[in-house]
């Protein structure tokens, strides 16, 4: 089974309000996110999945890599619809999150939902695709809603990034079928049992550490945005650590309460007095004759 760290990039732009997919583009996307999480983690219990949004004021990590769907669901509830997508920034932030994964043996994978027009130019997309290929990052696109506009750009991106056919493009037009059903039949999830050629430990050819390999610090990235991205990652990591600590403290408190309940019972049994009737039955036989 493939051991993966997967960052899912969702489209939360205004286009997600459209109802051409049941029950809306946004809801169809969320149902598919859950499916992908279930498939990835069931294929290998040590695989992790994270989530980020790429529209609105800025790209935002709403859930770091985790095996707990509850944390991913909590992040989905925090996401708000609004603004326009920035596909390049979304992918760059996803790659930075993967770079910080705890298990370096996990293959790096990004799944991007694109349901609104891509405004990034093809030259910038091509440059990013080459960086992903160099760093052994697989990427899958779920292209829906605006496929007539986006398909050409995404096909070129996949052609550039593809390394041993590890990246895929799935285009799903509106229709009577559900989005998650079409994705479930696609290579994005069918390849879960396939062996991987790289993408796990960081490539020896990578130039540097951190997010530099993915262009986060180059001239095309606003320094303030790069800082905001890192702060977002740290904030999410701190929140998860705080929740884990609170959960651990609650478990310890419950254990103490259970121990306190057991102590009175044990004390009562140890302090029990002998039965007077039993003492009478063991009296001296001579006294009984008197």
Image (cartoon, rainbow, N blue to C red):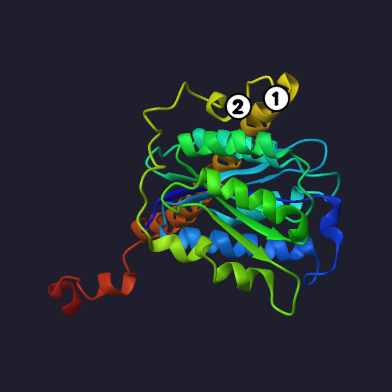
Q: Is residue 259 left or right of residue 12?
A: left
Q: Is residue 148 left or right of residue 232?
A: right
Say which element carries label 2. loop
Rendered location of residue 281, percent (x, y): 23, 76
Crowding near pointer 2: few (<14 within 10 Å), some, many (20+)?
A: many
The residue indicated by pointer 1 is: 221
Q: Residue furthest left?
A: 286
Q: Nearer the viewer, residue 261 or 114?
A: 114
Q: Nearer the viewer, residue 163 or 141?
A: 163
* First in sequence: mark 1 vs mark 2: 2
Q: Nearer the viewer, residue 245 or 89?
A: 89
Label 1 to label 2: alpha-carbon separation:
7 Å
Residue 215 image label: 2
Rendered location of residue 45, percent (x, y): 42, 57
Crowding near pointer 1: few (<14 within 10 Å), some, many (20+)?
A: some
Q: Is residue 200 above or below residue 195?
A: above
Rendered location of residue 212, percent (x, y): 56, 24
Residue shown at 54% from the left, 49% from the top: 159
Q: Is residue 112 above or below residue 43?
A: above
| Number of marks | 2
- Can you see residue 241? no
Classify residue 126 by image quadrant: top right
Say which element carries label 1. loop
CB under 8 Å between discs 1 and 2:
yes
Classify residue 24 by image quadrant: bottom right
Q: Is residue 116 above or below residue 245?
A: below
The quarter of the rendered structure image containing the C terminus is bottom left
Q: Is residue 126 above or below residue 31?
A: above
Residue shown at 67% from the left, 35% from the top: 123
The quarter of the rendered structure image containing the N terminus is bottom left
């Amino acid at each position: 089974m493939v051991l993966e760290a997967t960052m899912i990039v969702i489209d939360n732009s205004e286009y997600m309000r459209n109802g051409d997919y049941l029950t809306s583009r946004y809801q169809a996307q969320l149902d598919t996110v859950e499916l992908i999480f279930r498939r990835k983690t069931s294929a290998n219990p040590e695989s992790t999945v994270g989530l980020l949004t790429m529209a609105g004021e800025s790209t935002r990590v709403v859930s770091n890599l985790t095996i707990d769907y509850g944390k991913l669901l909590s992040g989905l509830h925090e996401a708000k619809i609004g603004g326009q997508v920035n596909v390049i920034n979304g992918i760059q932030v996803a790659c930075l999150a993967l770079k910080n994964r705890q298990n370096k043996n996990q293959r790096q994978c990004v799944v991007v939902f694109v349901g609104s027009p891509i405004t990034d130019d093809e030259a910038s997309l091509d440059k990013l695709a080459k960086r992903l290929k160099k760093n052994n990052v697989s990427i899958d696109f779920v292209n829906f809603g605006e496929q007539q506009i986006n398909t050409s750009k995404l096909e070129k991106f996949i052609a550039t990034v593809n390394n041993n056919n590890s990246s895929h493009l799935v285009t799903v037009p509106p229709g009577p079928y559900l989005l998650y059903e079409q994705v479930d039949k696609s290579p994005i999830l069918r390849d879960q049992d396939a062996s991987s050629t790289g993408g796990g430990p960081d490539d020896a050819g990578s130039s540097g550490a951190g997010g530099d390999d993915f262009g986060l610090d180059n001239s095309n990235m606003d320094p303030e945005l790069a800082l905001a991205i890192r702060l977002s990652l740290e904030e999410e990591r701190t929140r998860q650590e705080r929740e884990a600590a609170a959960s651990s403290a609650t478990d310890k408190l419950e254990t103490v309460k259970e121990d306190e309940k057991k102590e009175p019972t044990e004390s009562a049994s140890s302090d029990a007095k002998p039965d007077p009737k039993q003492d009478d039955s063991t009296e001296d036989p001579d006294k009984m004759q008197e």
